[in-house]
Amino acid sequence: MGEGFLVHLPHHRDANGVPSPWCIKDWRTGGLLDEFSTRREAQKALAKMGSFRKRSYVEHCPGHKNSQGELAEWCIKSHETGKILSSHKSEGAAKKHLQDMHAHSGSLLSFTSSFLKR
């Protein structure tokens, strides 16, 4: 199994129709790796994969608007606080930004400077 990231899709159901809003998707392809009914189950699975980063995750936030008042329903939220760190107009843009955040997280200076440029 490749490296994955956590996505919250409130209306997602698995192949059997069971609500499974917490999904692990592949970093490279964006393909679905696994589905879970709770965030805790998904986090445990990610930890077993060895790619769990307790920083942030992508979640669909229906009706959310960014600071410019534009509809931006795909949010990156903090695992620790649940607060929105950034919001985007598409799921793809949110995933790309999350991936960039994780790539720069090894360096506090890089993360801070990229965050301040926004």
Image: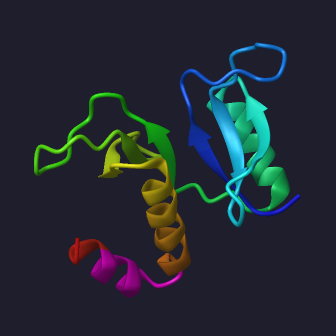
The extreme left residue here reads 68
Residue 43 in the image: x percent, y percent?
69, 43
Q: How is the image coloured?
A: rainbow
Q: Residue at x 13, y 50 (%)?
A: 67
Is 38 covered by the magenta stretch? no
Range of magenta residues: 106-114
- Give the x, y percent position of residue 74: 40, 44
Q: Quadrant of the C terminus?
A: bottom left
Q: Main secondary structure of the magenta part?
A: helix
Residue 57 relative to residue 52: left or right: left
Residue drawn at (80%, 44%) of the image? 45
* Residue 76 seen in the figure: yes
107 vs 77: above or below: below
Frontmost residue, 48 versus 15: 15
Q: Is residue 59 left or right of residue 70?
A: right
Whether residue 27 is situated above or below residue 100 in the rendered picture: above
Tell me where residue 54 sits by quadrant.
bottom right
Please state the horizontal and vertical placement of residue 83, each as a whole percent of the image. Answer: 34, 42
Is 8 left, or right, of 63 in this rendering?
right
Quick one: which residue is furthest to the top in this view? 17
Residue at screen point 72% across, 38% down = 42
**Quick one: 94 or 116, which is closer to the camera?**
94
The residue shown at (37%, 33%) is 61
The quadrant the N terminus occupies is: bottom right
Relative to 10, does residue 42 appear above or below in the rendering?
Answer: below
Give coordinates of residue 111: x percent, y percent: 38, 78
Query: Magenta stretch: residue 113 in it?
Result: yes
Q: Count the marks.
A: 0
**Residue 19 figure quarter:** top right
Is residue 79 in view from this perspective?
A: no
